[in-house]
Image: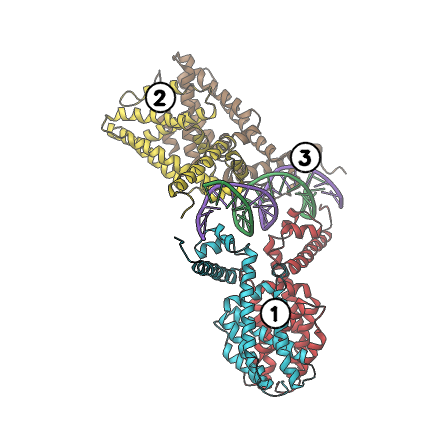
Chain colours: A yellow, B brown, C cyan, D red, E purple, F green
Amino acid sequence: MSPRTEQQQQSAREESRQRILASALALFSRLGYERTSVRMIAGEAGISQGLLYNYFAGKDDVLKALFERSMHDVLRSFEALHGSDPPAERLRRYIRACFAIVEENLEFWRLAYGVRAQPAVLAGLGADLPAWERTILDTLEEPFRTLGLPHPQTEARILFALIDGLSQQYARDPEHFPLREVADAVVARYRETPPP
Amino acid sequence: MSPRTEQQQQSAREESRQRILASALALFSRLGYERTSVRMIAGEAGISQGLLYNYFAGKDDVLKALFERSMHDVLRSFEALHGSDPPAERLRRYIRACFAIVEENLEFWRLAYGVRAQPAVLAGLGADLPAWERTILDTLEEPFRTLGLPHPQTEARILFALIDGLSQQYARDPEHFPLREVADAVVARYRETPPP
Amino acid sequence: MSPRTEQQQQSAREESRQRILASALALFSRLGYERTSVRMIAGEAGISQGLLYNYFAGKDDVLKALFERSMHDVLRSFEALHGSDPPAERLRRYIRACFAIVEENLEFWRLAYGVRAQPAVLAGLGADLPAWERTILDTLEEPFRTLGLPHPQTEARILFALIDGLSQQYARDPEHFPLREVADAVVARYRETPPP
Amino acid sequence: MSPRTEQQQQSAREESRQRILASALALFSRLGYERTSVRMIAGEAGISQGLLYNYFAGKDDVLKALFERSMHDVLRSFEALHGSDPPAERLRRYIRACFAIVEENLEFWRLAYGVRAQPAVLAGLGADLPAWERTILDTLEEPFRTLGLPHPQTEARILFALIDGLSQQYARDPEHFPLREVADAVVARYRETPPP
DNA sequence: AATGAATGAGCCTTCATTCAT
DNA sequence: GATGAATGAAGGCTCATTCAT
């Protein structure tokens, strides 16, 4: 004789989790992981400090959950782009997708860029992020390889760095960064085969 | 019986400052700014905690000093590259200089990449870093402008992002990143006018 | 359509209480009272945290219930030993009974020895334990008095301390403690009158 | 150019350590280890909470220091009793020494009896206490062996338990426990050879 | 009867910084 | 210049208990 339907229970719980994650993401993104206290997260989510530990094992677990959620989403987005298009076309689609992903998840990427540069924080995250980066690199490499370029791996690295660097510029100052124009410029640059 | 001349005094003081900065840099780079305690810095430098405050106003001041020193060095390196070469040549020299600077000051750049992504830490640093970035961008923009490219600002942004992204990859895993090859590939890409 | 008779109700309730007590005893005994959380007890008993408060007023009430149950049992065991035997015989029976009680309720006595030595915890228990100890002492004193020993109270104290100390040794390491032999040795020591 | 003599420094530091230990012992003894907070210890010692961590690694380290100090003292007291006396005489001296030690270090023994009965706390203490107990047992066993008793080990165990049990009674209520009389009674009991 | 989400106080610990010496 | 003892605030986390359902 549960006091609530199991389903109600589940969905309420999930909703609370999501609210905590949203608050944490906003704060992590604005202040950084280390400067954000559990107190703040709970306050922002409108719950008591202790309750957070009913949903997450600790502060680092909140971070981990944020990463898992987003890494997963990104990988799925990328998989959805696989297809039988000509490789150059695929490449351009990947490029646009990267910028779109960052644009749509600005807060998360601000956080991610911060965490990625802090080995100590990164270490507590498991091997997720490097593995994810590996996957993206491989995905980008494939079209170059298919196109027959001499150093597809280096090409992928360069393209990845370019997108990454631009995304960070955007993330640091979205108001003043002309993301669309820059994205267009990058895509244009990869219009010809072989790319420049 | 004056124990030291004023000059000796000064240089001894400067030496102590530098030792503290070196210790701080090593630790900040390895553990991150937040995870490094003043106690650790003093310990690594072989001095007492209290004495550090004789040389610096606080932990954030140590960070600021590290940035000032490096920003200053980098700007001077860049100025030294100005000249009457053809713009394309100048561009290539800038590119190589950027990679060289990161390679030679790996610890600092690891720290810088971490700090840059943490707004809260960055805020305590004054407006130094954004201003510096602005200068680099302007420097890179000039050759593109001279070359008569339609969007020199965007070109500069793209080149900067590319160098930045690659440098970060290198900083995260210097052992496995083929910095020279990648640098060559980037330079090659900017051999032609207009660049690809 | 009364779902249960009142008696069924009662006995089901009693059964739940006993299951909680059993879980609590196991945990208190193994981890100590302070290191055992209500959450653990409920988990071990297979019920929710909140429900525990339906059966007991709080954590300390669980402890109190455990003590009441055991103190009561022990006193009844002792009363059953009263009789018209010669005092020396009675004494020996008491001694054997003490060891038997500890052996049969090892978990409880481990807990009791821990609690007894912690005044703060003991305080929350009411005056039960000292009173109980008083009763045991009096019971042991009586045969000595009947035998005409000069200091029956001191004799009782000594015998009680001996049993107590040995029982604690046993409780701390039951595997390696030769309880039976030691019990025999103690009984043998009290065979003669006056006891040694 | 140390600001103080090294010796001054050392002795001041040692004095602070001792004051903290004294405060901790008083509180541990009165409230138990678990119920005593670091705040309380610091407050009782008249220092700030943080300073305690300048002298001890943590709460458990304070406990460990208390035990090391006392275990060491007790063992030295015991060694001082070794000698060429007849074994029965030595035995009586040991017995008196045990009671004297407890009487003189009442607070510590109250703490020790509490800790000994709490496996979880005991575990954080290293193997000190069991080893110490072993030594005492061995020391007590030797005279029985020399006297040619059939089961010297059992004899030692019994004597140890007796002293232990009585000491605990004393520790629980020193005002009303006739320690001297009881000690005399125990010694008297071991006057004859073989002991009764 | 039964759940478990929710609370708030408290825990141990770390830290940047100050200050007497 | 140099020390390190000392502070006070904050950190992450646990827990007994309450309450809406």
The answer to whether dots 2 and 1 both sit on one chain is no
What kind of element bears circle 1? helix
Subunit under mark 2: A
Image spot of residue B55 (x, y percent): 65, 35
Q: Nearer the viewer, residue D120 or D88?
A: D120
Describe residue A18's horizontal placement relative to residue D27 as left or right: left
Q: Quadrant of residue B128?
A: top right
Instruction: Check disc 2 and give the amino acid type.
Output: Val
Image spot of residue D6 (x, y percent): 71, 51
Disc 2 or disc 1, which is closer to the eye? 1
The answer to whether dots 1 and 3 both sit on one chain is no
Residue at numbered disc 2: A186
The residue carrying pointer 1 sits among few (fewer than 14), some (14 to 19) or many (20 or more) residues within 10 Å by Cα, namely some
Q: Nearer the viewer, residue C135 or C95?
A: C135
Residue at numbered disc 3: B8
> What mark, if any, has residue C132 been given in the picture?
1
Image spot of residue D75 (x, y percent): 63, 70
Please say whether residue B5 is visible from this viewpoint.
Answer: yes
Please say whether residue B85 is visible from this viewpoint.
Answer: no
Residue C32 sits above or below residue D165 on the image: above
Residue C106 sits above or below residue C145 on the image: above
Estimate the spatial distance between the alpha carbons at disc 1 and disc 3, rounded to whole Å.
81 Å
Subunit under mark 1: C
The answer to whether dots 2 and 3 both sit on one chain is no
Disc 2 or disc 3, which is closer to the eye? 2
Instruction: Check disc 3 and give the amino acid type.
Output: Gln
Estimate the spatial distance between the alpha carbons at disc 2 and disc 1, rounded to whole Å.
86 Å
Disc 1 or disc 3, which is closer to the eye? 1
Instruction: Check disc 1 and give the amino acid type.
Output: Trp
Estimate the spatial distance between the alpha carbons at disc 2 and disc 3, rounded to whole Å.
56 Å
Q: Nearer the viewer, residue C144 or B137?
A: C144
